[in-house]
Image: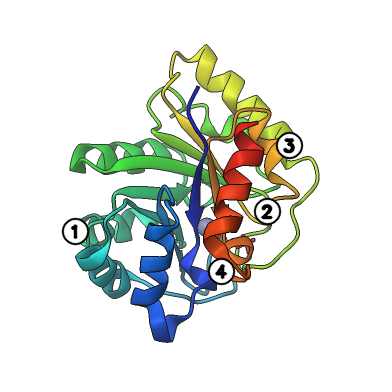
Amino acid sequence: FQPLRVAPSILSADFMNLSADIELVESADAGFIHVDVMDGHFVPNLTMGVPVVKQLKRIARIPLDVHLMVSNPLDQLPWFIEAGSDILTVHAEALGEGELERAVDLIRSSGAKACASLKPNTPASALDAVIDRLDMALVMSVEPGFSGQSYIEGSEDKVARIADMARAAGNEAMLIEVDGGISASTVERVAAVGADVMVCGNAFFKADDPAAELKRICDLGNA
Ligand code: DX5
Ligand code: ZN
């Protein structure tokens, strides 16, 4: 049993006061800082990239959880490794035959933690080739691209399936992260089937008291 962790997504932060918001995340006892990198191609939105990760690394005291929503992750991985990402997530949909294995091995050989992500319509079996060595799997519970969307009902079924696959592959240490529409009203159903890390954008940053909200989400998920 692992206590549940919350990873606030800084896509919902105040970019004009980012260091204050990082302080808010860390003082709230968050597990990771979730960084949504979008290239305007793999997803319609365009957000932040290597320079932001590099500067976050100068002040972050907890791991940087970098979620790459880009079309060419194999080209970009070396830059994000170099920038100091602690956890690197690539999307299975952006990688062709044999490439997901290459990406995961590249991340792990750099010393960073490797995570693979699936969009809502991608089956769990897309992780078959890497399930034995992933540090984490990320289940998208909204279509990637924007914060503030509603949780897609039934996403917890894929979490359960991936938890079974990891167990069957002997990878008990693998974490499962869920991203999209996670809040106090949705955390219980994903935690119940084995999710360990909750990405929270709006649920954290738009709360009146973000630290209290994070604690409430953790308590509900750990119950
Ligand atoms: C969506 C991003 C998410 C998003 C989460 O493509 O990957 O991390 O910012 O935001 P909320 O929690 O508001 O759905
Ligand atoms: Zn994300």
Mark closer to the chain start, 4 or 3: 3
Q: For the residue labelled by badge 1, is the local secondary structure a helix, a strand or a loop?
A: helix
* Residue depth check, mark 4 versus mark 1: number of the one nearer the observer: 4
* Residue depth check, mark 4 versus mark 3: number of the one nearer the observer: 4
The reply to whether residue 55 is visible in this rendering is yes
Looking at the image, residue 164 lies above or below residue 129: above
Q: Amino acid at mark 2?
A: Ser
Residue 43: where, in percent of width, then height?
A: 57, 67
Left of 107 or right of it: where is 89?
Answer: right
- Name the quarter showing ligand 1: bottom right
Q: For the residue labelled by badge 2, is the local secondary structure a helix, a strand or a loop?
A: loop
| Image mark count | 4
- CB of mark 2 within 8 Å of CB of mark 3? no
Mark closer to the chain start, 4 or 1: 1
- CB of mark 4 within 8 Å of CB of mark 1? no
Mark 2: C-beta under 8 Å from nearest atom of ligand 1: yes
Residue 99: where, in percent of width, then height?
A: 39, 42
Residues packed near mark 3 inside 10 Å, few (<14), some (14 to 19) or many (20 plus): some
The answer for how far apart the CA atoms under marks 2 and 3 are is 11 Å
Left of 137 or right of it: where is 135?
Answer: left
Q: For the residue labelled by badge 4, is the local secondary structure a helix, a strand or a loop?
A: helix
Q: What residue sits right under mark 4 in the picture? A: 205
Mark closer to the chain start, 2 or 1: 1
Q: What residue sits right under mark 2 in the picture? A: 183
Left of 134 or right of it: where is 145?
Answer: right
